[in-house]
Image (tube, rainbow, N blue to C red):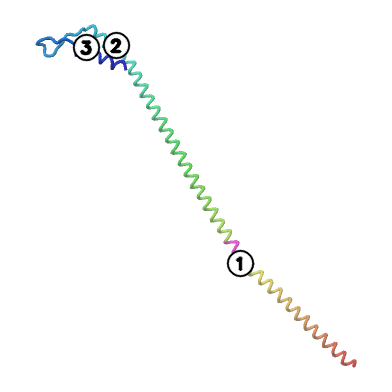
Amino acid sequence: MKVDGLITELRDIMETAKGMPFSGGKALVDTNNVLDIIEEIEQEFPQEFRQAKSIVADRNQIIADAKREAEEIIRAAEERKKAMVNQHEIIRLARQQANEIIADAKDKNAKMKVVTNKYVDDLLKKVDDSITGYYTDIKNVRQQIKSIQKTQE
């Protein structure tokens, strides 16, 4: 910063100035030289202020960009969290539905076993009844054949 150098130059002039006796610390300085330095400082201030404003504006832009990026990161994290929660919920519901399907299938399987066993038992009873009937018929026919044979002898 050029202003710092000019202020240092003014300080040097003041420190090297010859003091006036009995003046209470007053000194003689080259007023033209001091005024030239002050004028340069005044000319530099607008440039320094512009640089300072530019730095502040850049700082503000950097902060705004950082805030925007932080908000985007937070938003993305929230969306990811929601997606993970939704995914977890979907998995939980899928497992629940799978368990319900399995339980229903087991229940239907048990009922089908009961129905199948009853059907097989009924069918075997019919076969048994038929066989018993045929057996009785066969016994009767055999009896008749024996009776016929006895009468023919």
Disc assigned to residue 110: 1
Secondary structure type for disc 1 = helix
| Above or below for 42 versus 105 | above
Looking at the image, which residue is at 34% across and 16% down? 47
Judged from the image, the secondary structure of the residue bearing numbered disc 2 is helix
- Proximity of marks 3 and 1: CB atoms separated by less than 8 Å: no
Q: Which mark is residue 150?
A: none
Decide if residue 83 is on the left or right side of residue 9: right
Q: CA distance from mark 3 to mark 1?
A: 110 Å
Q: Are marks 2 and 3 in contact (CB under 8 Å)?
A: no
Residue 111 magenta-highlighted:
yes
Residue 94 x, y percent position in the rendering: 55, 53
Reading the image, the residue beneath label 3 is 13
Classify the position of the N terminus by image quarter.
top left
Q: x and y percent of residue 7 in the render? A: 25, 15
Dot 3 falls on a residue whose secondary structure is: helix
In terms of depth relative to the viewer, which is nearer, 14 or 138? 14
Q: Name the amino acid type tagged 3.
A: Ile
Please tell me which of labels 1 and 2 falls first in the chain: 2
**CA separation in Å, label 1 and label 2:** 103 Å
Magenta stretch, residue numbers: 103-112
Q: Residue furthest right?
A: 152
Q: Nearer the viewer, mark 2 or mark 3?
A: 3
Instruction: Sort mark 2 into few (<14), some (14-19) or many (20+) by Cα contacts within 10 Å.
Output: some
- Residue 149 appears at what percent x and percent y? 87, 90
For the residues carrying marks 1 and 2, which lies nearer the camera in this image?
2
Q: Quadrant of residue 65?
A: top left
